[in-house]
Amino acid sequence: MLKRIDPLLTGDLLAILRDMGHGDEIVLTDANFPAAALARRLIRLPGIGVDRVAEAILSVMPLDDFVVAPAAAMSSPDGRPPIYDDFDRILSDAAGAPVTMEEIDRFAFYDRAKTAYAIVATGERRLYANLILKKGVLRA
Protein backbone atom coordinates (compact mmCIF):
# COMPACT_ATOMS: atom_id res chain seq x y z
CA MET A 1 0.00 0.00 0.00
CA LEU A 2 1.09 3.55 -0.68
CA LYS A 3 0.05 6.72 1.09
CA ARG A 4 -2.48 8.85 -0.79
CA ILE A 5 -2.53 6.44 -3.75
CA ASP A 6 -5.94 4.92 -4.42
CA PRO A 7 -5.71 1.14 -3.84
CA LEU A 8 -7.50 0.52 -7.17
CA LEU A 9 -4.41 1.81 -8.93
CA THR A 10 -2.46 -1.41 -9.41
CA GLY A 11 1.24 -1.40 -10.21
CA ASP A 12 0.51 -2.18 -13.86
CA LEU A 13 -2.06 0.61 -14.12
CA LEU A 14 0.22 3.12 -12.39
CA ALA A 15 3.00 2.20 -14.84
CA ILE A 16 0.68 2.81 -17.79
CA LEU A 17 -0.47 6.16 -16.39
CA ARG A 18 3.15 7.15 -15.75
CA ASP A 19 4.25 6.15 -19.26
CA MET A 20 1.42 7.97 -21.04
CA GLY A 21 2.34 11.32 -22.54
CA HIS A 22 0.40 14.52 -23.14
CA GLY A 23 -2.51 13.79 -25.44
CA ASP A 24 -2.44 10.02 -24.97
CA GLU A 25 -5.81 8.46 -24.23
CA ILE A 26 -6.96 5.78 -21.82
CA VAL A 27 -10.32 4.05 -22.27
CA LEU A 28 -12.45 2.92 -19.33
CA THR A 29 -14.99 0.32 -20.39
CA ASP A 30 -18.04 -1.48 -19.12
CA ALA A 31 -18.23 -5.27 -18.87
CA ASN A 32 -19.80 -5.61 -22.35
CA PHE A 33 -17.05 -3.77 -24.23
CA PRO A 34 -14.77 -5.86 -26.53
CA ALA A 35 -11.67 -4.69 -24.66
CA ALA A 36 -9.42 -7.68 -25.35
CA ALA A 37 -10.08 -7.45 -29.09
CA LEU A 38 -9.24 -3.74 -29.28
CA ALA A 39 -6.58 -3.04 -26.64
CA ARG A 40 -2.92 -2.39 -27.28
CA ARG A 41 -2.45 -2.61 -23.50
CA LEU A 42 -5.18 -4.08 -21.31
CA ILE A 43 -5.79 -3.77 -17.58
CA ARG A 44 -8.67 -5.73 -16.05
CA LEU A 45 -10.45 -4.50 -12.92
CA PRO A 46 -13.35 -6.96 -12.65
CA GLY A 47 -16.08 -6.23 -10.15
CA ILE A 48 -15.28 -2.52 -10.04
CA GLY A 49 -17.57 0.16 -11.47
CA VAL A 50 -16.28 2.43 -14.21
CA ASP A 51 -17.13 5.53 -12.16
CA ARG A 52 -14.93 4.33 -9.28
CA VAL A 53 -12.08 3.56 -11.69
CA ALA A 54 -12.40 7.02 -13.26
CA GLU A 55 -12.13 8.62 -9.82
CA ALA A 56 -9.02 6.62 -9.02
CA ILE A 57 -7.31 7.44 -12.33
CA LEU A 58 -8.21 11.11 -12.16
CA SER A 59 -6.77 11.31 -8.65
CA VAL A 60 -3.32 11.07 -10.26
CA MET A 61 -3.77 11.93 -13.96
CA PRO A 62 -4.42 15.46 -15.22
CA LEU A 63 -6.95 16.00 -18.01
CA ASP A 64 -5.80 17.74 -21.17
CA ASP A 65 -6.77 21.42 -20.97
CA PHE A 66 -5.43 22.19 -24.46
CA VAL A 67 -8.49 20.60 -26.10
CA VAL A 68 -12.17 21.46 -25.97
CA ALA A 69 -13.27 17.98 -24.82
CA PRO A 70 -10.67 15.98 -22.85
CA ALA A 71 -13.23 13.23 -22.30
CA ALA A 72 -15.51 11.27 -24.60
CA ALA A 73 -18.33 8.86 -23.86
CA MET A 74 -20.04 6.29 -26.06
CA SER A 75 -23.43 7.65 -27.10
CA SER A 76 -26.57 5.60 -26.59
CA PRO A 77 -29.34 5.31 -29.20
CA ASP A 78 -31.81 5.61 -26.30
CA GLY A 79 -30.71 9.07 -25.16
CA ARG A 80 -28.40 10.20 -22.38
CA PRO A 81 -27.51 7.28 -20.07
CA PRO A 82 -27.76 8.00 -16.31
CA ILE A 83 -24.03 7.17 -15.90
CA TYR A 84 -23.25 10.42 -17.75
CA ASP A 85 -24.31 12.39 -14.65
CA ASP A 86 -21.67 10.47 -12.69
CA PHE A 87 -19.10 11.12 -15.43
CA ASP A 88 -19.87 14.86 -15.39
CA ARG A 89 -19.47 15.01 -11.59
CA ILE A 90 -16.24 12.98 -11.56
CA LEU A 91 -14.68 15.03 -14.38
CA SER A 92 -15.57 18.40 -12.83
CA ASP A 93 -14.40 17.29 -9.38
CA ALA A 94 -11.05 16.20 -10.82
CA ALA A 95 -10.56 19.36 -12.88
CA GLY A 96 -11.99 21.78 -10.35
CA ALA A 97 -14.31 23.16 -13.04
CA PRO A 98 -16.86 21.85 -15.54
CA VAL A 99 -15.34 19.62 -18.23
CA THR A 100 -16.72 19.12 -21.71
CA MET A 101 -17.45 15.47 -22.46
CA GLU A 102 -17.93 14.64 -26.12
CA GLU A 103 -20.48 11.96 -27.05
CA ILE A 104 -19.43 9.72 -29.92
CA ASP A 105 -21.11 6.94 -31.86
CA ARG A 106 -20.45 3.36 -30.78
CA PHE A 107 -18.39 2.41 -33.84
CA ALA A 108 -16.41 5.66 -33.78
CA PHE A 109 -15.74 4.93 -30.10
CA TYR A 110 -14.41 1.47 -31.03
CA ASP A 111 -12.13 3.00 -33.67
CA ARG A 112 -10.79 5.54 -31.19
CA ALA A 113 -10.30 2.84 -28.54
CA LYS A 114 -8.09 0.90 -30.98
CA THR A 115 -5.63 3.80 -31.04
CA ALA A 116 -5.73 4.50 -27.29
CA TYR A 117 -2.63 3.99 -25.20
CA ALA A 118 -4.49 1.51 -22.98
CA ILE A 119 -7.91 0.13 -22.11
CA VAL A 120 -9.12 -0.57 -18.59
CA ALA A 121 -11.87 -3.20 -18.63
CA THR A 122 -14.08 -2.85 -15.56
CA GLY A 123 -16.90 -4.96 -14.21
CA GLU A 124 -19.41 -2.16 -14.82
CA ARG A 125 -22.84 -3.56 -15.72
CA ARG A 126 -24.61 -0.32 -16.65
CA LEU A 127 -24.95 0.01 -20.41
CA TYR A 128 -22.99 2.61 -22.38
CA ALA A 129 -20.66 3.18 -19.42
CA ASN A 130 -17.57 3.71 -21.57
CA LEU A 131 -15.32 6.72 -21.19
CA ILE A 132 -12.15 7.99 -22.90
CA LEU A 133 -9.81 10.29 -20.95
CA LYS A 134 -7.09 12.38 -22.62
CA LYS A 135 -4.00 12.96 -20.50
CA GLY A 136 -2.92 16.51 -19.84
CA VAL A 137 0.23 18.09 -18.45
CA LEU A 138 1.46 18.92 -14.98
CA ARG A 139 2.26 22.58 -14.70
CA ALA A 140 5.19 23.89 -12.65
Image (spheres, rainbow, N blue to C red):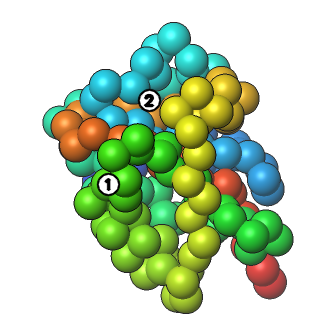
Q: Which residue is mark 2?
A: 43
Q: Which residue is mark 1?
A: 81
Q: Residue at x 57, y 76 (%)?
A: 99
Report how far apart the C-alphas of labels 2 and 1 lie in the structure.
24 Å
Residue in the foreground of this view, choosing between 118 and 105 = 105
Where's residue 13, x and y in %? 48, 40
Q: Is residue 70 above or below residue 132?
A: below
- Secondary structure beneath dot 1 equals loop
Residue in the foreground of this view, choosing between 35 and 77 = 77
- Callout 1, which amino acid? Pro
Task: Left or right? Give the position of 58 relative to 104.
Answer: left
Residue in the foreground of this view, choosing between 31 and 24 = 31
Where's residue 61, x and y in %? 58, 62
Task: Left or right? Give the position of 75 relative to 79.
Answer: right
- Examine the rendering and report whether any part of residue 1 can be seen: no
Quadrant (top left/top right/bottom left/bottom right) for the N terminus:
bottom left
Task: Left or right? Give the position of 105 relative to 89.
Answer: right
Q: Determine crowd level at label 2: few under 14, some 14-19, many 20+ residues with C-alpha closer than 10 A.
A: some
Q: Determine crowd level at label 1: few under 14, some 14-19, many 20+ residues with C-alpha closer than 10 A.
A: some
- Examine the rendering and report whether any part of residue 32 can be seen: yes
- Secondary structure beneath dot 2 equals strand
**Disc on res. 97:** none
Where's residue 68, x and y in %? 75, 70
Q: Is residue 132 above or below residue 90?
A: above
Nearer the observer: mark 2 or 1; the answer is 1
- Callout 2, which amino acid? Ile
Where's residue 5, x and y in %? 38, 63
Quadrant (top left/top right/bottom left/bottom right) for the C terminus:
bottom right
Q: Residue at x 20, y 37 (%)?
A: 125
Q: Please tell me which of labels 2 and 1 falls first in the chain.
A: 2
Disc 2, disc 1: CB below 8 Å?
Answer: no
